[in-house]
Amino acid sequence: MDIFLVALLSYISGSIPFGLILTRVFGKIDVRKIGSGNIGATNVLRTGNKFLAVATLLLDMLKGFIPAAITIKYYPDLTQLSCLLTFLGHVFPIWLKFKGGKGVATYLGILFALSLPLSSLFIFTWLTVSLIFKYSSLSSIFSSFTVFVIDLVKTTTLDSINENINTGENITFILSIFFVLIIFTHKKNISNLLNKKEKKIKI
């Protein structure tokens, strides 16, 4: 019963399309009909409304953080399942015929629940790459890869020093899954980057 409850609530939380809701209610437009057609914060920014873009970013992060944090506290054995289904809820929301966003903000919210140092690393890396190259997609892919690699190196190094060292829950596996999924959700962006057609961030 616990696993069903956690799975259902995690997916429902992740599937709330805040970008679409905010742009329809306050912007009177359908964000799916502009830019990339994505419901995430980056495409909401293309409406020209920075406030709605920031609000979308924060709410998408929050819907990732809340189910993960609750599961960590009350059902720790189901943490990684909750994180995965929350992310998948955003990417494949039942309310939008399973056509959702790319999951980066939701992933970051989940990461905040799992590890503050890794979430801080993600933000630092994302900002650095975006300031240099001006591509949101490239920043997201590189940041998720960096988080995965650093966690893998840390876990492997500590295990090699002393197998009895307790580093907390091993999240390397779920981070590797998230990296693969972020590559998947950005496959069109990767093609655009290779063909020099990807749109740069305009702030």
Image (cartoon, rainbow, N blue to C red):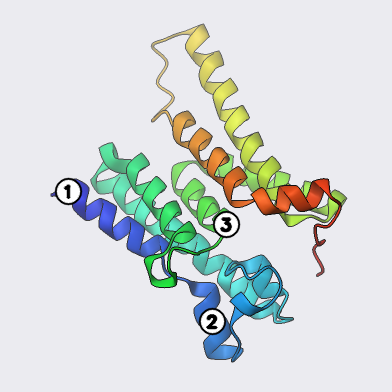
Residue located beneath label 3 in the image: 102
Which mark's residue is nearer the viewer, 1 or 3? 3
Give whichever of discs 2 and 1 has the lower sequence position: 1
Residue nearer the viewer, 68 or 11: 11
Residue located beneath label 1 in the image: 2
Residue 133 lies, in percent from the top left, at 85, 50
Residue located 52% across and 51% down the image:
107
Q: Residues within 10 Å of mark 2 (few under 14, many from 20)?
A: some
Residue located 42% across and 15% down the image:
165
The quadrant of the rendering that contains the C terminus is bottom right
Residue at the left extreme, as displayed: 1
Residue located beneath label 2 in the image: 22
Give whichever of discs 2 and 3 has the lower sequence position: 2
Up the image or down, 42 lies above or below 187; here it is: below
Distance between mark 1 and mark 3 Cα atoms: 28 Å
Up the image or down, 23 lies above or below 159; here it is: below
SS at mark 2?
helix
Residue nearer the viewer, 27 or 61: 27
Residue located 73% across and 56% down the image:
136
Q: Residues within 10 Å of mark 1 (few under 14, many from 20)?
A: few
SS at mark 3?
loop
Residue located 28% across and 60% down the image:
9
